[in-house]
Amino acid sequence: MPELKYATLAVHAGQHPDPLTGAVNVPLYLSSTFELTGIGTDKGWDYSRAGNPTRDRLEESLAVLEGGNRPGIKAFAFATGMAAISALLAPLRMGDHVICSHNVYGGTARLLDQIIAHYGIAIQYVDMGNLDLLAAAIRPNTKLIYCETPSNPLMQLTDIRAVADLAHQHGIEVSVDNTFLSPVLQSPLDLGADIVMHSTTKFLNGHSDGLGGALITTTKEQAERTLLVQKAVGATLSPLECYLVLRGIKTMPLRMKQHEENGRAIAAHLASHPKVLRIHYPGLETHPQHALALRQQKGFGSMMSIDLGSREAAGRFLAAIEIFLNAESLGGVESLASHSSTTTHAALSAERKLDMGITEGLVRLSIGIEDKDDLIADLDQALATI
Ligand SMILES: Cc1ncc(COP(=O)(O)O)c(C=O)c1O
């Protein structure tokens, strides 16, 4: 059979019928423990923190969707995206140095600054758009370059191939948070990244009904250390949430088509709207990294942010939206809008936010899969209240 296409893999990878009953959906194994077959022998599972059959299927699916059929790719599912990032960072040692994208999800910066830094690990934020700055930041003890592209909420891109080439010359690993585009629209491993991270809470689940996170690794050593953290720290994804992500994955390629179509149409509309002072969407030709987006992404997705000029204007807009919901998170079927400064990036100081470019008037939009004309009408009526 020829190599299977992505939409086929989304429905079938890891999701084969249950060998015991023939059930076409992966069964939900709600069992914390498993009967052993003897001393030191079992049927493949002994305790759900170490391994659960439903989680195994999700991890199989994620490995294929993110890594294709290359050998050695392994996926690990965690309780949240933050738990996945924690598992990525947990193997670092005192004295190590991490370089992180200047603009990242506020929770990631909070984890790095308020937890990881206390373990004697040096954290340095660098504008990954500037490779000279990145090269200058590399030290002999740099162990990881942590990228988020596109970044939350400013949609800044990192040239994954260029960063990976530079990092690998120094023996440094590169991780990419691929949450904003999903594995459908960007394949960081093909561009040279070593580890991919996802908040499965977003596009992979797609229905805003469960949290989750994942790491996808490329080498045996990475897989071994990630498995150890998963088992030793224990922030694993529950079987029910694994099931929900598996269900979401089946329609992900279809959903991403609609997210993409709506995202492009809405960005084009907002780009010339008089109430929108600035729009951040790499799909627009005016975005400074549009050429990079065309080169390294398979689409532009449905995440964008708009600057409405002031906190008051943002407040009016958020109070007036009717189809869009004023809520954190992203990647679900429903459209959401959120005030970045007081939600996703609330943990950062006012100076840090301004330095990053997160203004008081900035509103992040996650465009869902509703009819785009309805969404545009909703945005227009809400913008008219400013
Ligand atoms: C880009 C990005 N990475 C990671 C996370 C953390 O994921 P979770 O909320 O599932 O812990 C988020 C959450 O919004 C995010 O936007």
Image: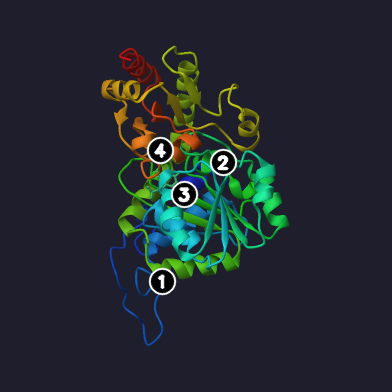
Q: Amino acid at mark 2?
A: Gln
The residue that disc 3 covers is 198
Let me know if residue 15 appears in the view: no
Whether label 2 touches label 4, CB < 8 Å: no
Q: Residue furthest bottom?
A: 39
Looking at this view, is 225 or 172 the one in front?
172
Question: Which of disc 4 and disc 2 is earlier in sequence?
Answer: 2
- Could you say whether the residue bearing mark 2 is in a helix, strand or loop? loop
Residue at 32% in and 17% down: 382
Q: Nearer the viewer, mark 4 or mark 3?
A: 4
* Residue carrying label 1: 232
Residue at mark 3 to residue at mark 1: CA–CA distance: 21 Å
Residue, disc 2: 186
Q: CA distance from mark 2 to mark 3?
A: 12 Å
Q: Earlier in the sequence, mark 3 or mark 1?
A: 3
Whichever of labels 2 and 3 marks the residue nearer the N terminus, that label is 2
Q: In this rendering, would 303 be left or right of 319? A: right
The number of discs equals: 4
Dot in front, 2 or 4: 4
Residue 101 picture quarter: top right
Q: Which residue is mark 4?
A: 350
Q: Which label's residue is closer to the chain start, 4 or 3?
A: 3
Mark 3 near ligand 1 (CB under 8 Å)? yes
